[in-house]
Every structure is written in structure tokens, then in C-alpha cells.
Amino acid sequence: MKKLFAAITLALTFGAFAYAAEAPKAPAAGTGAPAVAAPATAAAPAVTPAVPADAMKAATPAPSTPEKKTLKANPYVTIPIFLIIIAVTLSVVIWSAKKTKSAADFYTAGGGITGTQNGWAIAGDYMSAASFLGISGMISLYGYDGFMYSVGWLVAYITVLLIVAEPCRNAGKYTLGDILSFRTEPKPVRAVCAISVVAVSTFYLTAQMVGAGKLMQLLLGIPYKWAIVGVGILMVGYVVFGGMTATTWVQIIKAGLLMTGAAVLSVLVGLKAGMSPFQFFNDIATSPNIMEHVQKVVLKDPLPVPGFDYGQRFLEPGLFLKAPLDQISLGMALVLGTAGMPHILMRFFTVPTAQAARKSVIVAMFIIGSFYILTTLLGFGAAIHVTPQGIQAVDKGGNMAAMMLAQKLGGDISPFLGDLLLAFLCAVAFATILAVVSGLVLAASAAIAHDIYVNVIKDGHADQHEQVMAARVTSLCVGAMGIIIGIAAEKQNVAHLVALAFAVASSGNLPVVVLSLFWRKFNTAGVISGLVVGTIASIGLVMVSPNMTYPQKIADDAKKAIVKLEEKQASGAVLAEKELKDLDKAKADFAKNDGGKSFLGLKKPLFTLKNPGIVSIPLGFLAAIFGCLAFPSRRSEEMFDEIYVRQNTGIGMAKAIDH
């Protein structure tokens, strides 16, 4: 074992000492796209101050000329911080490995995690790189709509607290399959449930792995493949040797680091505005760079609409999720999907009592809520101080916004502080990804080893040593597959995979969990039909939704921009230098994408919403209900009283082991 950990440390050290290279530059922001009829300016949110009259009257935002930006970390500052975090987490794994002897130890830390510890671990499991980097980046590019993601993920834990936390802890053992198979035919239910769990975990895991590879490649100059391999080796080491105990403590450490980094950066953002929220929002609404970004990139107006206030529009909903149904559908998926995520449900089996399960959710809600408030400040702060154009010059998706903000605000005080803040946030993002992928690998391996191998193949007849060995071998295989998939997905757009994970969890997992716990007539047919229909419907709708890339739509948008700009030329007006660049880019986009089709051979989306929740969630519930009614089971009805007593009292749960 010591040799393995030495090899892991050596591999990461070798990768980390690769010299820092400049980040590749993405195309500059500004897309010559079609004009969109701009609605009348809606009322601003209550916290938004009045915008000065001269800003309201300005029809054309002052053009910005951002320098070509790169983002690179100072290796002399970054590498020591990376190595410290790796050393601390590996020491946790070594300590945990000595305590992991039984299947209960491996899957649930023996049920000996306290409510407060579990709350921090849930927060660490939930606050992924998508939250830290993605949401702050989305807010920096789309304003208010990015904040809606934060609200959805926070409100989701109210569903978890009120519906699933206590019953799942009392009725389950290690996995989602344990809950669903209690009063149904165990073998088919466990098999189908394991497939669903592995699907959700794979979608989410792939997005995290690609994010890790791109982050290390961009910031440290480490080749993408080696970055993926390094993350994968650490991830496998945490899970295979430390099990749930190591994963829990890695998540706790990561949550503490993430909150610290976000808090420090938020204070610096506040100081720039004099700690005044009114000044902060006024800076947003009057920023020429934000105005230009909203006009040309978000609303896609090649020419400004006279009298329209683009800065104020940044603080209003509808820039990213333009249709009300899209916002409702996203909200449904986020609020209900969390309660069906297997790596979140698995955490409720780690506490000794139902009271501890409730406490862990409340602690997690407080931490997660505080964190998402901070990410809002970071996103808007990046839009003001780094500018959307500068952010997109480094990464078109905006994922480096928080990193660039740290380097900018720290650098305004001293160059070393800028390097230190950037290095610290790089290490935090790295730890974030490690913690989340470890939880996902543990959930997927538990579904395969415990549900498929132990209970389906071995029919429940496997001793503790065999169960632990199966879990470790499965974790190793899942981790290896994660590395392979991460490398294969390097050039793919994986943003839709996160939406897909939540869609599957809310449409397939949640309906069968809720009905299994609370409906007497629920049975085997209901579980299988709900899981199959909900999963297939959500995956199918995402694959024909706007989340996928449609080259022909890009070409059509470019054509509209070309027509607008050429009409201006034909009228005798002289195009500005930036408008000429927009025209050239639009022509290039049209030539490149005209006649192209999506992954499924479509020219445009068949399903217009970005998240399928509003359709797939009801389908999952209806399929589960109709399946039960079509194939009733007296045995399932008779066993309802027992599971009802278990979920309310905890009778039958194994005694916790103190850790």
C-alpha cells in the first residue's frame, strides 16, 4: 500500500512540476448574430438602484477594446499549495484504510458520521466545480439567469429535508437499490436500479473529469490526458482504500477550503464597491463592457436599439432562459433531481440516527446557501472588473471567471497576492473535483458491487471480506472507466451532461423512491416502469434539445447578422472597425456551418426547452403509477406497514460504529 501511495504522489508531483504555459485563446467575444426584437425594459429588481439618466439615454454603449487575455498560475506558488492539499488528503486515506474492514465501513463509514460532519460532507459533495466555476461564470455572462441556478440548487434541499432524508436513512442500508427492493422482487429491481445509478453517475462524472482536465491544462500547462490520469489515480486511491470514511473527510476539507476562498474573494469584491450594494449594482448597470456584451453577444443585436438600456437588462431575467417554461422546467429538475441523486442519497446512510440525518441536511443547507450567495457576488464582480469580453477571451463558456477575478483583485493589491489567490483557488477547484468524483465513483461502485454482484449474482450470500473486495475491485474499474471516458470526451461539449444527470435523477429515481416510501400499492412493476420510462424520456429529450450543437442554426444566425450589416453598408454608412470584424466572423461562421447537422442528424431542436423536467418528470410518475395498477402485487401491499414503521422509527437499522 505504501508503494501505491508513493507512486500516486510521484505521479501528481511530476504533473504539477510541468511549467505554467499560457492559456489558449478562444475567439474574441462578439458574434455577429441576428437581431432580436428587444422587449421594453422591465422593472428592475428591488435591490437595483436607479440608473443615471445619461446612461439610460445612451443608445450605443462605449466600445471596449479589451486586451488579449491569458490566465496562467505561478508554479512557484501553485505547486506547494497543490502538494499540501494532496498530502493532507492522502494522509486521510491512509488513516481511513486502517478503519475500513467491513462492507458497512466501506459504503457508509459504519453509520458513525455525526450530523454536523455529514452536513459539511453533503455540502462538499454537492458544491461541485460546476457550482464554483460554472455558476459564477454564467452570472458573469448572463447576469440574473445564472443566479437562478443557485436558487434552484439551494431550494432542492428543502425537498430532501422534508421528503427523503429521514425515511431513506431509516429504510435503506447502503444503496438506492436497498430502499426500492425492500417490498419488491429484489433481483430485477436491483438490476434496473443499478443501471439508472450508473447512468446518472457516469453523466455527472464525465463532466467533472473533463472540467478537471481542462482546468489543469489551462492553468498549469499540464497535458490534458496526464491531468485526467492524475485526477483519476487520486480518485481511485481515495475510494478503493479509504471508502466512505476517506471520501467523507475529503469532502469536509474541500467544503472548508471552498467556503474560505469564496469568502475572501467576495470581501475583495465588496471593498471595490465600498461595501455598498447600491454602488455594486450601479456599477453593473452602467458598465460599458457589460452593455456591449448584452447587446452583441447575448441579445445578438448587430446594431444597438436606440433608447434600450442593455446594462439594466443584465440585471433582469430572460437572457439565458428566454422562455418561462424553460425556467419552470429547470426549476423542477433542480429541486426534484437532487433528491434522486444517488451520491447524495447514499450520504444519509452514514449517520447513526434520523435526527442526525435531519441535522445534516440543515447544516448543508446553511453552508450551500451561504456559498451560492458568494458565487453571485463573484459572478457579478467578474463582469465588472474582468469584463465579459475578457472572460470569453480566455474561455468562451466563462468557467475561468472566478479564477480571473482572483488574479485581478489580488494583483491590484500586490502581484504576489494575485498569484497566491489564483493558486489557492486552483487548488480548491482541484480538491472540489476530487471530492465530487470520489462520491460519484463510490455510488456507482456500490450499485454494481452491492446490488448486482452481492445480491443478484451471489444471491446475498457473500461474507464481509468478499463484499469489501468486490467493492474495491468495482471502484477500481469504475475509476478506470472514468479516466478513459474523460480522455475520450476531451473535445466534446459536455455541458449538457450535468443537465442530463439531474433530469434522469428527477424523472427516473425520484418518482420510484417517493412512491416506494409512501404509496401502499407500489410494487415491482411500478419501480421498473418508472425507472425505464423516466430515464429514457429524459435522455431522449435532452438529445433533441437546444443543449446539443446545431450547425445549421449557427449558420442561420450568422446569415441574419450578415444581412443586417450589409444593409447598413448599402445605405451608405461606414461600418466601424469592430462591425467589420463582426461581419467577417459572421461570414466565416456561415461558411463553416451551413448545411451541418447535430449529433442525431437534426438541423434544429425537436424539443425547444433546455431542460426536459417539465415533461419527463410527470412521465416518470405516470409510468410508475400505471405500471403498479396494471400489475398489482398483494405481497407489496402487505409489506407496506413494515417499511412504514421502519422509515419512521429506524427499527432494523444496524448499530452505528463510532468514527
Image: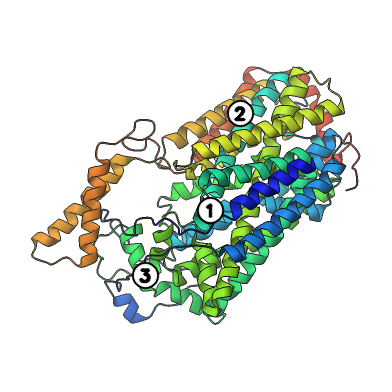
> Which of the two discs, 3 and 2, labels the residue nearer the N terminus?
3
> Which of the two discs, 2 and 1, labels the residue nearer the N terminus?
1
Does residue 130 sit above or below 385 in this rendering? Answer: above
Q: Could you tell me which residue is drawn at 61 percent across and 28 percent down?
A: 531
Does residue 73 sit above or below 166 in this rendering? Answer: below
Residue 656 in the figure: left or right of residue 152: right
- The numbered disc on residue 531 is 2
- Where's residue 160, x and y in %? 69, 46
Does residue 194 sit above or below 326 in this rendering? Answer: above
Determine whether label 2 and label 1 are within 8 Å by CB.
Answer: no
- Where's residue 186, x and y in %? 74, 21
Residue 169 in the figure: left or right of residue 271: right
Residue receiving disc 1: 215
> Can I make out residue 515 in this image?
no
| Amino acid on which disc 3 is placed | Asn
Q: Residues within 10 Å of mark 3 (few under 14, many from 20)?
A: many
| Amino acid on which disc 2 is placed | Leu
Look at discs 2 and 1 and give the one toward the viewer: 1
Q: Could you tell me which residue is drawn at 74 percent across and 19 percent down?
A: 456
- Where's residue 108, x and y in %? 80, 40
Residue receiving disc 3: 289
